[in-house]
Image: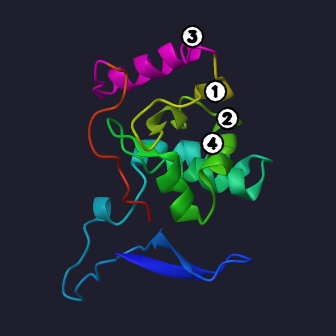
Amino acid sequence: MAVGIKRKRTGENVDATILLPQKIAKPIPNDVALKEEESTSVPEDMEPQLKRITESDRTPFEKKVWSLLCQIPRGHVSTYALLAAHLGSSPRAVGNALRRNPFAPEVPCHRVVATGGALGGFKGKWPKDGEGITLDEKRKLLRGEGIRLDDKGKVLGTPWAAFV
């Protein structure tokens, strides 16, 4: 489902509609009690990382981005765009916060890829040919978590988007 926003450009007679993603939340019935492990969105092993993030002197936005990373389960990836949509920000801003992540790889910025499955500019580096030690490192980290890549180096599977 998408929400349409009509914008009229100067000098145009026609309105252009831009579709934006809309979150759809399923209500939890009152008679269904959540188990303890289901009541939290962050795996228990990430609690120390959340504490490190909270106690850091970084910007509130960076802390929000890094805290979201802690929700992405091992063996899954998400995208810059999905994180940005959840935060009401832009993929570029998310990428910049990930580039400044001082807690990697424990706070797993390697689990974020481009919308099409490409690995992106890991550690803020964009070598001429798109390759280099940083992308080799990202591939190694992802494969170590069981994430599969196709023959062109793109991540296979559906991005994880269950942020709370």
Which of disc 2 and disc 3 is earlier in sequence? 2
Q: Which mark is residue 95?
A: 4
Image point 74% across, 77% down: which residue? 10
First to last magenta residue range? 128-151
Q: Quadrant of residue 36?
A: bottom left
**31 vs 109, nearest the viewer:** 109
> Residue 40's x, y, as percent?
39, 62
Which of disc 3 and disc 1 is earlier in sequence? 1
Give the left or right position of residue 103, taking residue 135 as reference. Answer: right
Marks 1 and 3, how far apart in space?
Answer: 10 Å
> Residue 125's x, y, as percent?
66, 23
Dot 2 crowding, Cα within 10 Å, few <14, some 14–19, many 20+: some
Which of disc 4 and disc 1 is earlier in sequence? 4
Q: Is label 1 in a helix, a strand or a loop?
A: helix
Mark 2 and mark 1 residues within 8 Å of each other at the beta carbon:
yes
Mark 3 and mark 2 residues within 8 Å of each other at the beta carbon:
no
Marks 3 and 2, how far apart in space?
Answer: 15 Å
Marks 3 and 4, how far apart in space?
Answer: 18 Å
Marks 4 and 2, how far apart in space?
Answer: 6 Å
